[in-house]
Image (cartoon, rainbow, N blue to C red):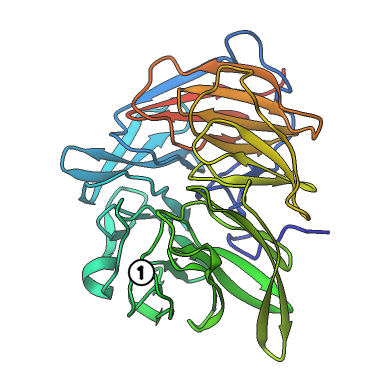
Amino acid sequence: MFPRVLAGLLALTLLAADWPQFRGPARDGVSKEKGLLQSWPDGGPPLAWTAKGLGGGYSTVSVSGDRIYTLGNKGKESHVVALSRADGSVLWSAEVGPAGGSLGCTPTVEGGRVYALGQMGDLVCIDADGKKVWQRNLATEFGGKKGGWNYCESPLVDSDRVIVTPGGKEATMVALDKNTGKEVWRCPIPTKHTEAGYSSVVVATVGGIRHYVQLFNGGLVGVSLDGRVLWTFEKLGGNTANVPTPIVMGDHIFSSIGYGRGASLLHLTAENGRITVREVYYARELTNKHGGVIQVGDYVYGDTDDSGHPYCAEVKTGKVIWKRGDEGKGGGSASVTFADRRLYFHYDNGTVALVDPSPGGYREVGSFTAPRRGGPSWAHPVVSDGRLYVREGDLLYCYDVRAK
């Protein structure tokens, strides 16, 4: 009923094992890999290697070719860090801009270049050797309006453009030439709350109209490929912080936010070049602060606000099927990804749990705790090429999760 829409986010030559941007190739948190462990031994899967020197922050990793990329705060600066996929050794570290706030941007890798956004609005394009190709600042050059935790968006690279959200009245969303950084268009969004928020842009196609969907502090918005507002949904606006990336399900959009607000499922209809939005339901129980929500078949899975109590809900109705109780060792907010019939939850207390996504109830089939923690465990887990990547502050742990 709700087919997934890849929407051409990446070139067709992308390796299936790569994870080149936040929430993976389709920005839905779902890996297409097979042949992975369906349960873990006591203590978790084997640790392949540990990387050090990432810096502080909560950014997760992008994996492309023989390299891994992430962002980290090092002193007063934020840096893009490139690691070897083979052993985690640091290949180079490139300054992005000043540090400040909770660094959460994940680099986007496309065409041999890396695109990343620092906390203070510094958007950079870096080549394979760690040298800057171009740099723009969303705050000073576009009149951007960031939230209280500064900028945390992960840039979208779509064809020859980079799409980001400065916020503010003048250029709430902008498109830049990916090769030069030159402005292609700017889109002011007429809402009461124009702060950027902390979500990342996704692509939807409805009735042949391909467009960009973003959750910012004003709510949800759909923007055309040439920078025009196609539709808005302001019910989810005006929140303390809007973080989770929306999920595109064909002609439906699912969006969950935290701080007790809940989630909405929208149905989009296109006619005569216009898109009409209808709310299918609003479910207050389906809150999610920053760990993300995953769609698997007819269900969605995510953490209840910041509680460490993941839920399973029927996507077409919003009905909660189950919610985790006190079983397991996981505690605090939980981020999630999905690969080969299993959910991977990374809890705030450092616990990583492998979970059977059955609607019959929350059932762990393995868990472990990261050997050494580096502050709150807010980085989303990543599964790529049979490896599970778990970031803990300055450290990155790589686990072998291939079935033998």
Q: Position of residue 184 (x, y in %)?
A: 40, 80
Of the 4 image quadrants, the one containing the C terminus is: top right
**Residue sticking out furthest to the top:** 42
Q: Amino acid at mark 1?
A: Gly
Q: Which residue is mark 1?
A: 167
Q: Position of residue 247 (x, y in %)?
A: 63, 56
Q: Residue at x 46, y 28 (%)?
A: 348
Is residue 16 among what the camera can see?
no
Q: Residue at x 62, y 51 (%)?
A: 284
The picture quadrant where one finds residue 371 is top left
Q: Residue at x 70, y 38 (%)?
A: 33
Query: Helix, strand, or loop for circle 1?
Result: loop
Q: Position of residue 135 (x, y in %)?
A: 26, 63
**Residue sticking out furthest to the bottom:** 272
Which residue is more in the foreground, 399 or 153? 153
Which residue is more in the foreground, 348 or 28? 348
The picture quadrant where one finds residue 232 is bottom right
